[in-house]
Image (cartoon, helix red, strand yellow):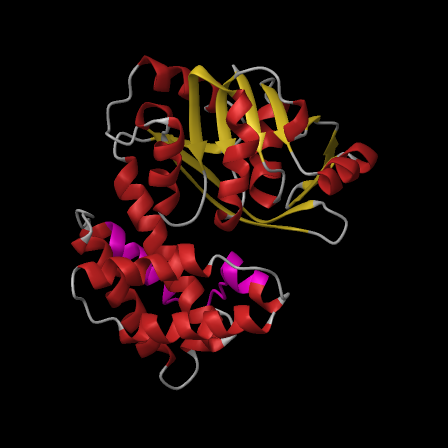
C-alpha cells in the first residue's frame, strides 16, 4: 500500500516513522523548511526506549504526480484548507483519506472536497511534541492509532487499510464504531485544552487550586451536553473513564493546544472550542464556561 503522510510533525512524524520501519511504502508530504530539515538530519524519534533516526521518503506539493492508496492527514486543523490543495493531485479513484485532526469539523470539510466515499475515520492518542531541532519526542509510551469506516461498515477497502497499519509497532484499534471514539476523543481533548488554557497550568495545578475541580467538571459537563445533543450515543463507562483520567491530581496533564499557546504559536481555538459553541447554539444550550474559554482564546489570538 502506497501511503502519503501529510505532515511530519509530532503526530505524522511518529506514526509515519513506525509505518516506514514496518516496511510500508510511506512518503511524507512536507513544507520547504521541514523538507530541508529532514533532508539534513533525518527523521529523529526520541522515545522512552531511546533515540532512532531514519531517512524518510519526502515530497513537496509541487512534486506530487501520482495517486496514493491511503493519505493520512496529520496537520493542525487550521492548515487543512491548504493541505487539501496540496494533496489533491495525489487523490485517485481508489484513494482513501484518513484525517487525524482534532475536533470533527474537518470530516465534513474533506467530504465536501473529495467525496463522502473517500474519507474514513481516524484518531490517535499519543503524548508527543517536536523538539527545538525538529526531533519527534514521544513523552510517554502511549501510541494508539484508531481507524474505521465512518458508517461502521468496514468493507474490503478498510480491511486493506487495517492489514497495512496493524503491524506498525504501535497499538492499533480497527474500530467498527469510530464515530463514538471520535466524539469521546473530542470530549477529552476539549475539556483538557479548555481548562489548561483558561487556567494557564496543568491539571495537577488546576485540581489542587481552590475551585479547580469544579471548573474541570463544569467544562466537562457542558461539552458532554453539546456532543450528546449533536448525536453522540453516550457510553457511560467511557465518559466516566475520561472524567476519572482528567480528575486525577497525581497525574499532571496538558493538551497540545495549551503547549502551543504558552509557546506563542497559532492554536486550534475555532476547531476545538469554537465549533462546540456553534453546535451548542444550534440546540439553545447554555455553555457559560465554554464561552469564557473561547473569549480567552480569542484575546490570545488577537495579541499574537
**Left or right: where does residue 134 sit relative to residue 98?**
right
**Residue 144 counted in the magenta span:** no
Q: Residue at x 74, y 54 (%)?
A: 132
- Quarter location, residue 53: top right
| Residue 257 in picture, x, y percent from top left | 51, 60
- Quarter location, residue 15: top right
Q: Residue at x 63, y 66 (%)?
A: 264
| Residue 152 in picture, x, y percent from top left | 24, 28
| Residue 22 in picture, x, y percent from top left | 59, 21
**Residue 241 counted in the magenta span:** yes
Residue 225 visible in the current orientation: no
- Quarter location, residue 136: top right
| Residue 230 in picture, x, y percent from top left | 20, 51
In the picture shown, does residue 150 fall above or below 277?
Answer: above
**Left or right: where does residue 194 sit relative to residue 36?**
left
Instruction: Give the number of callouts.
Output: 0
In the picture shown, does residue 153 fall above or below 41?
Answer: above
Residue found at the very far right of the displayed protein? 40
**Left or right: where does residue 220 sit relative to residue 64?**
left
Which residues, given as a range, are shown in magenta?
238-260
Q: Residue at x 28, y 21 (%)?
A: 154
**Left or right: where does residue 294 sit relative to residue 300?**
left
Q: Nearer the viewer, residue 211 or 155?
A: 155
Residue 172 visible in the current orientation: yes
Amino acid at each position: 500500500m502506497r501511503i502519503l503522510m501529510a505532515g511530519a510533525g509530532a503526530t505524522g512524524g511518529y506514526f509515519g516513522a513506525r509505518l516506514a520501519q514496518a516496511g510500508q511504502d510511506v512518503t511524507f508530504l512536507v513544507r520547504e523548511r521541514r523538507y530541508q530539515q529532514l533532508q539534513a538530519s533525518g527523521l529523529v524519534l526520541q522515545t522512552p526506549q531511546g533515540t532512532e533516526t531514519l531517512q524518510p521518503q519526502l515530497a513537496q506539493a509541487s512534486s506530487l504526480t501520482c495517486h496514493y492508496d491511503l493519505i493520512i492527514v496529520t496537520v493542525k486543523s487550521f492548515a487543512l484548507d491548504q493541505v487539501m490543495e496540496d494533496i489533491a493531485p495525489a487523490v485517485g479513484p481508489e484513494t482513501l483519506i484518513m484525517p487525524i485532526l482534532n475536533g470533527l469539523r474537518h470530516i465534513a470539510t474533506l467530504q465536501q472536497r473529495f467525496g463522502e466515499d473517500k474519507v474514513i475515520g481516524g484518531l490517535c492518542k499519543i503524548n508527543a511534541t517536536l523538539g527545538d531541532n525538529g526531533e519527534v519526542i514521544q513523552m510517554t509510551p502511549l501510541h494508539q492509532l484508531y481507524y474505521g469506516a465512518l458508517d461502521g461498515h468496514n468493507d474490503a477497502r478498510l480491511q486493506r487499510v487495517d492489514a497495512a497499519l496493524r503491524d506498525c509497532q504501535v497499538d492499533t484499534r480497527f474500530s467498527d464504531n469510530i464515530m463514538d471514539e471520535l466524539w469521546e476523543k473530542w470530549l477529552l481533548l476539549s475539556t483538557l485544552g479548555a481548562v489548561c488554557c483558561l487556567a494557564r497550568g496543568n491539571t495537577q495545578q488546576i485540581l489542587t487550586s481552590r475551585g479547580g475541580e469544579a471548573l474541570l467538571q463544569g467544562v466537562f459537563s457542558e461539552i458532554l451536553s453539546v456532543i450528546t445533543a449533536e448525536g453522540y450515543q453516550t457510553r457511560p463507562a467511557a465518559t466516566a473513564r475520561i472524567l476519572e483520567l482528567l480528575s486525577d491530581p497525581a497525574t499532571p496533564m496538558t493538551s497540545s493546544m495549551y503547549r502551543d499557546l504558552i509557546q506563542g504559536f497559532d492554536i486550534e481555538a475555532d476547531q476545538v472550542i469554537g465549533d462546540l459553541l456553534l453546535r451548542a447554539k444550534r440546540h439553545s444550550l447554555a455553555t457559560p464556561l465554554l464561552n469564557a474559554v473561547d473569549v480567552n482564546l480569542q484575546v490570545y489570538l488577537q495579541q499574537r
